[in-house]
Amino acid sequence: MSENKTPFETLYELDVRDKLEKKKSGGSELSYLSWAQGWREVKKLYPDASYEFERFGENNLPYVYDPLTGYMVFVKTTIKNVTYEMCLPVMDGANKAMKAEPYTYTVGFGDKQREKSVEAATMFDINKTLMRAFIKCLAMHGLGLSLYFKETVAPETAARLKKEKDDADKELEASIKNIQAEIVSTAKKMVDSGIDSTEIYAKIEEIGGKKNPNSIKDVEKCKLIIEALKEMKGNNKSGK
């Protein structure tokens, strides 16, 4: 964490792609950052961070309710003396406001009109909304904010991630070439020692799916091939 960066800059640039979870919604798969993952990342960087669910009325309930518009929850998060507030309505899977009683509404026009229903809200729905409001409030501090405008990472992070990926790809490519060369060298020595090349390359194809070792790009398969060839070589010696 750079001392020259604000908490917003630090959290905005934090790559959370490997922390995302997935869920089905409307026939498509959505990626999201769970409240638990988000809070863990924040507390690792800022141990003094805090949050508060606002409460209302004599019963100290964590929501306000209006019979016409439905339920609304509010949360505050504070990081390094900066506080943001987020409000969020309690909604169903179709993003329709949930109320104390179930209700119906009409969609479509003319002959294509149909009626849809919205279930009454439960405490489970309210709790889910509280945690959604909480993670969105953390986004106001920068954490995962880019996810809300369909970016997977902050632009400042993209160049670093690309370089890391390119370096990893180069390292993998070098590893593959080295292990391919080892297969070729091992096979040559086996042929020179009198082992039938047909058997050798049949074993390579059996494990790697191809006879030519230079066409096999899977490191784990290459390792298995080397082990198998060494075993063949050992068996051949013991057979003699």
Image (cartoon, grey):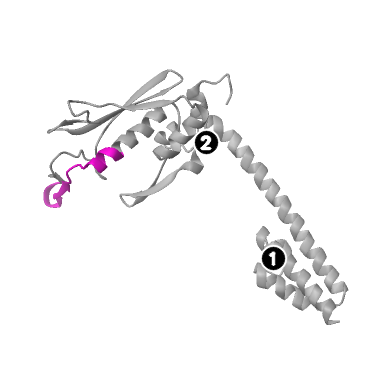
| Quadrant of image for the N terminus | top right
Task: Estimate how packed mark 2 is, as few (under 14), some (14 to 19) or many (20 or more) residues with alpha carbons within 10 Å.
Answer: some
Q: Amino acid at mark 2?
A: Asp
SS under mark 2? loop
Q: Position of residue 70 (x, y in %)?
A: 17, 34
Q: Is residue 73 magenta?
A: no
SS under mark 1? helix
Disc 2 to disc 1, how far (Cα)?
35 Å
**On screen, 181 above or below 93?**
below
The magenta stretch is 109-128
Task: Estimate how packed mark 1 is, as few (under 14), some (14 to 19) or many (20 or more) residues with alpha carbons within 10 Å.
Answer: some
Q: Is residue 18 visible?
A: yes
Which quadrant of the view contains residue 103? top left
| Quadrant of image for the C terminus | bottom right
Which quadrant of the view contains residue 214? bottom right
**On screen, 162 above or below 5?**
below
Residues at discs 2 and 1 in contact (Cβ within 8 Å): no
The numbered disc on residue 15 is 2
- Could you tell me which residue is drawn at 51 percent across and 24 percent down? 9
- Could you tell me which residue is drawn at 48 percent across and 30 percent down? 43
Q: Position of residue 184 (x, y in %)?
A: 79, 64
Q: Which residue is mark 1?
A: 224
The answer to whether 160 appears left or right of 133 in the picture is: right
Q: Position of residue 127 (x, y in %)?
A: 28, 38
Q: Amino acid at mark 1?
A: Leu
Looking at the image, the residue that sits furthest to the bottom is 240
The numbered disc on residue 45 is none
Q: Is residue 118 magenta?
A: yes
The answer to whether 98 appears left or right of 18 in the picture is: left
